[in-house]
Image (cartoon, rainbow, N blue to C red):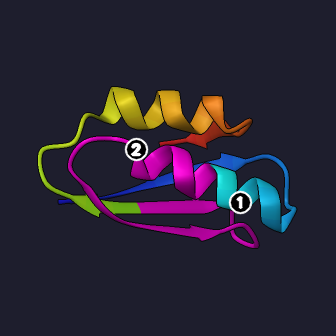
Amino acid sequence: MTKNYSISGPSTEAAVDSLVDEVQLVRGIHTVDVDLENGRLTVSGEDFSGEEILQAIATAGYTLTNE
């Protein structure tokens, strides 16, 4: 399963790394791709919780702008 999220937040490399790290902690996630230029977060995996992804996005200091 692959899901895309529209996000906004810090654009530093360290902040992006933090976002990737947080999302990868969600059970079932296989890959995480961040495209800040277009404000997109793409996650792929199996049986992961969308609610946990949203929490990871917020924990990393980003805001969901549109799902």
On the rendered structure, is 53 left or right of 13? left
Asked if residue 34 lies in the magenta stretch, the reply is yes
**Vertically, is 62 above or below 31?**
above
What type is the residue that disc 1 sits on?
A: Val
Q: State the residue in front, 2 or 47.
A: 47
Q: Work out how far the residue at label 1 is from the one at label 2, CA to CA, in angstroms.
A: 14 Å
On the rendered structure, is 3 left or right of 54? left
Please give the name of the residue rendered at 87% of the width and 62% of the height, measured from the top-left corner.
12
Q: How many marks?
A: 2
The image position of residue 8, as x and y in percent, is 74, 48
Please give the name of the residue rendered at 80% of the width and 60% of the height, measured from the top-left corner.
14
For the N terminus, the image quarter is bottom left
Which stretch appears magenta? 19-42
Q: Quadrant of residue 58?
A: top right
Element type at marker 1?
A: helix
Determine which of the numbered discs, if any, sits on residue 25 in the image.
2
The image position of residue 55, as x and y in percent, is 50, 27
Q: Give the residue pinned by disc 1.
A: 16
Please give the name of the residue rendered at 37% of the width and 30% of the height, measured from the top-left corner.
52
- Earlier residue among tags 1 and 2: 1
| 1 vs 2, front mark | 2
